Structure formats: structure tokens, C-alpha cells
Image: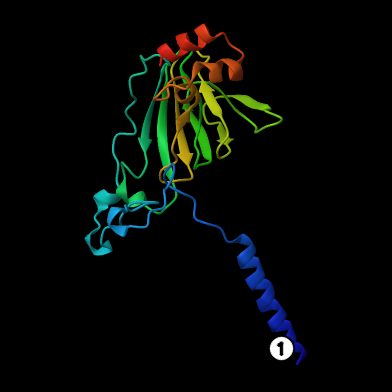
Amino acid sequence: MEGFNFLQALFILALASSLAYASDPSPLQDFCVAINDPNDAVFVNGKVCKDAKLATADDFFFSGLNIGKITSNSVGSSVTPVNVAQISGLNTLGISLARIDYAANGGLNPPHTHPRSTEILVVLEGTLYVGFVTSNPDNRLIAKVLNKGDVFVFPVGLVHFQFNPGKSKAVAIAVLSSQDPGVITIANAVFGSDPSINPDVLSKAFKLDKSMVKSLQSKF
């Protein structure tokens, strides 16, 4: 009888534990508006799966990550993503990666966030000054200079950046914990939204003259 009670208690604890950790699956899109008419519905949270019998090696393959991209743009960096859009076999696997090339003397991957992913970065070439900012109210900067072979982690959802202070180019590989991590570049989102955010809002939020806000918006 004592054994039965022990097993019964163990079962209840296991059930309670599973319920305590249960949650909705992480969304793989920015939002999903509920709809009552199924005829107007679309597939969400991933992509429709191919019949497994029809899968080929090419569904799990990508070529060209050894080739750097041009960095002669306004920020001096370029990202080559390898997510579910490039490798369809990544669907449902919860992982992706990207190559980032940084120009010498100031190449920057601007402050941004991945709403659906933690990121781990490894430097393949050059030197990078990297960091992230913790959430309110502390807003603490955690930053470090990385060299070839160094690894750094950016927790999910936190604003982070990479900057090349060196005199030669830099290259890094980022691995992300989502097949589609999403990216929100802070400056683009705030000053380049479509339609534009009311300058009064940004003027007060950033403690800037309205003319300065309008000037910044015009650059995006």
C-alpha cells in the first residue's frame, strides 16, 4: 500500500511539473490575428512541411558562406543569413546562422535585437567590440573586445551590436536559436518606420528638438 501511495504521489508531482512548464510555442512571425472564417486563414508558426518521402539533400544544403559580401554601405557591414528561407530543411528545427562581414576602421552591425532568438557569435577574422544592454531599469552595458577564435553570447530579445575598431576587415559567424530569428534594427525601426512616428513622440522620448527628429527621419 505504501508503494502504491509513493507511485501515486510521484505521478501527481510529474503531472504538476509538466503543467508548470507548459506554455504556448514561441511564435515564428511578428503577430497572428485570430480569425473565425477558416477560408481567410493562412498557415502560421513555420512553413508547410514537404512529404518526408520527397525530401532531398538539397533541402538541407547551402553553399557560399565562404564568400564575403561587400561592406561599402552606410554602416560598413553585411549579413549573409542562412535560415529557413535559405535552407528549407531547417523548418521546425529551431536553429539558423549568419555570416557577418565588417569593413575595416569602423564597420558596424548597428544596435538591433532578435525577438525570437538567442545569438552566439564566434569571430573568424579580425577584432570586434561587441556588447548588449540589459532590460529596464538597469540598462547595463555588458561589452567586450573579441579577437579571432573568441565567442560571445547575446541573450534573446536584448539590444546588441558589433563594431570593428581594427585596421583590417573582420568576419564572424552567428548561430541563432530559431529557424527565423527576426531582426529589429533600432534606428531603422524608430526613425524609419512606415508611416513615420509622430516627431512629437520621438522628440520627447529622446529629448531632442523636433527639427533634429525630422532630420533623422529623413535619413531613413
Query: Which color scheme did the rendering employ for the protein?
Result: rainbow
Residue 117 is situated, as x and y percent measured from the top left of the image, at 50, 42
Q: Please state, as top left, top right, bottom left or bottom right, where the C terminus lies in the image.
A: top left
Q: Secondary structure at mark 1?
A: helix
Residue at 67 percent of width and 32 percent of height: 136
Residue with the mark numbered 1: 4
Vertical position of residue 104 compared to residue 79: above or below:
above
Locate residue 121 relative to residue 44 in the image: left or right: right
Residue 47 is situated, as x and y percent measured from the top left of the image, at 33, 52
Query: Residue placed farthest to the bottom in the image?
Result: 1
Q: Please state, as top left, top right, bottom left or bottom right, where the N terminus lies in the image.
A: bottom right
Residue at 22 percent of width and 60 percent of height: 54
- The answer, for residue 112, to whether it is visible in the render is yes
Residue 139 is situated, as x and y percent measured from the top left of the image, at 67, 28
- The answer, for residue 105, to whether it is visible in the render is no
Q: Quadrant of residue 73?
A: top left
Within 10 Å of the Cα at label 1, are there few (<14), some (14-19), or many (20+) other Cα atoms? few
Q: Amino acid at mark 1?
A: Phe
Along the line of sight, the residue nearer the viewer: 172 or 31: 31
Residue 2 is situated, as x and y percent measured from the top left of the image, at 77, 89
Locate residue 74 relative to residue 13 in the image: left or right: left
Along the line of sight, the residue nearer the viewer: 199 or 1: 199
Locate residue 209 relative to residue 90 in the image: left or right: right
Vertical position of residue 180 compared to residue 16: above or below:
above
Query: Residue placed farthest to the left in the image?
Result: 54
Vertical position of residue 85 compared to residue 34: above or below:
above
Along the line of sight, the residue nearer the viewer: 17 or 120: 17
Locate residue 135 relative to residue 56 in the image: left or right: right
Residue at 73 percent of width and 88 percent of height: 3
Residue at 45 percent of width and 41 percent of height: 181
